[in-house]
Amino acid sequence: MIFLNINNLNVSIEGKKILDDFNLTINQGEVHAIMGPNGSGKSTLANVLAGNEDYEVNSGKIIFKDQDLLGLNIEERAQIGIFLAFQYPVEIPGVNITPFLQASINSKLKNENKPELDTLSFAKLLKEKAKDLGIGPDMLKRSINTGFSGGEKKRYEILQMSVLNPEFTIFDETDSGLDVDALRIVTEGINKFKNDNNSFLIITHYQKLLDYINPDYVHVMRNGKILKSGDISLAVEIEKSGYQNF
Ligand SMILES: Nc1ncnc2c1ncn2[C@@H]1O[C@H](COP(=O)(O)OP(=O)(O)O)[C@@H](O)[C@H]1O
Ligand SMILES: [Mg+2]
């Protein structure tokens, strides 16, 4: 099975070219990190993978689990196992966490022709997952991200991931501006969730995050392309000398 293959992808926003013949292959169970200066197109890549329609795909192909990903809309992509953790999580006042997550997981289960979870079984599952992540029952009664602290938003994001159980999770600078505790929530959450079936694309500026996660590959992106790929030592090099050598 081809897990994820991005082939000669060209993307523009308002006529400006952002991704330029972009190529990347991620196999099942792999953790890839992308680093790169601001404006390289990292968030564009994340959004195009997740199915955000504000971006114009001019040419190229994305295969995910042997399917033509570009032919699917944002909901369909979530249903087949793509999850994007945002750089700036949105607040959704009035939408309670528990029914929202129940609806999300049931939509995925339905798509997989699996039985949906009733309210009681879902509540049980959610409580277990939350407990695993050190989240108390009070948070589960709240509206999504509304009035959450930075650390709470991260916990919620990790909880959402662990409930939905996506096969491919994209973190877009989810570590930006986080304190050490929040960083630990994210990295511990990822490490707990990581297994041979699910893959990650982690967009970050910090070697520190990657030290905790230990990615299989690190890529340097600039001007809409990957310029260099390597292992964690590439992140160490960037932390030391910046992007000037690329
Ligand atoms: N909504 C938008 N409208 C116009 N230009 C945009 C928009 N979003 C991003 N861009 C431009 O696209 C380029 C890449 O942005 P982005 O993908 O956010 O880069 P990165 O995440 O690597 O910092 C930048 O030059 C940015 O100004
Ligand atoms: Mg960005």
Image: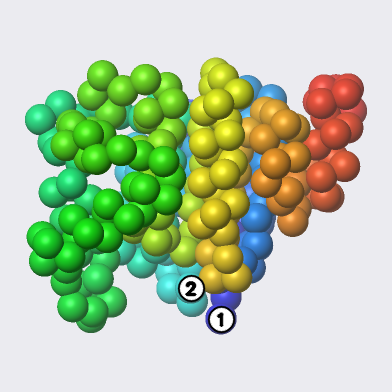
86 lies left or right of 170: left
Q: Which amino acid, mark 1?
A: Met
Find the distance from the CA under tag 1 to the CA under tag 2: 6 Å
* Image quadrant occupied by the C terminus: top right
The answer to whether residue 117 shows anywhere in this view is yes
* Image quadrant occupied by the N terminus: bottom right
Nearer the observer, 33 or 22: 33
Q: Residue at x 40, y 61 (%)?
A: 165
Q: How many marks?
A: 2
Q: Residue at x 38, y 28 (%)?
A: 152
Mark positioned earlier in the residue sequence (1 or 2): 1
Task: State the image coordinates of residue 74 (x, y, percent, origin top left).
Answer: 30, 52
Task: State the image coordinates of residue 185 (x, y, percent, origin top left).
Answer: 52, 36
104 lies left or right of 56: left
Circle 1 residue: 1
Circle 2 — which element? loop
245 lies left or right of 72: right
Circle 2 residue: 65
Q: Residue at x 57, y 75 (%)?
A: 2
Circle 1 — which element? loop
Mark 1 CB near ligand 1 (8 Å cut): no
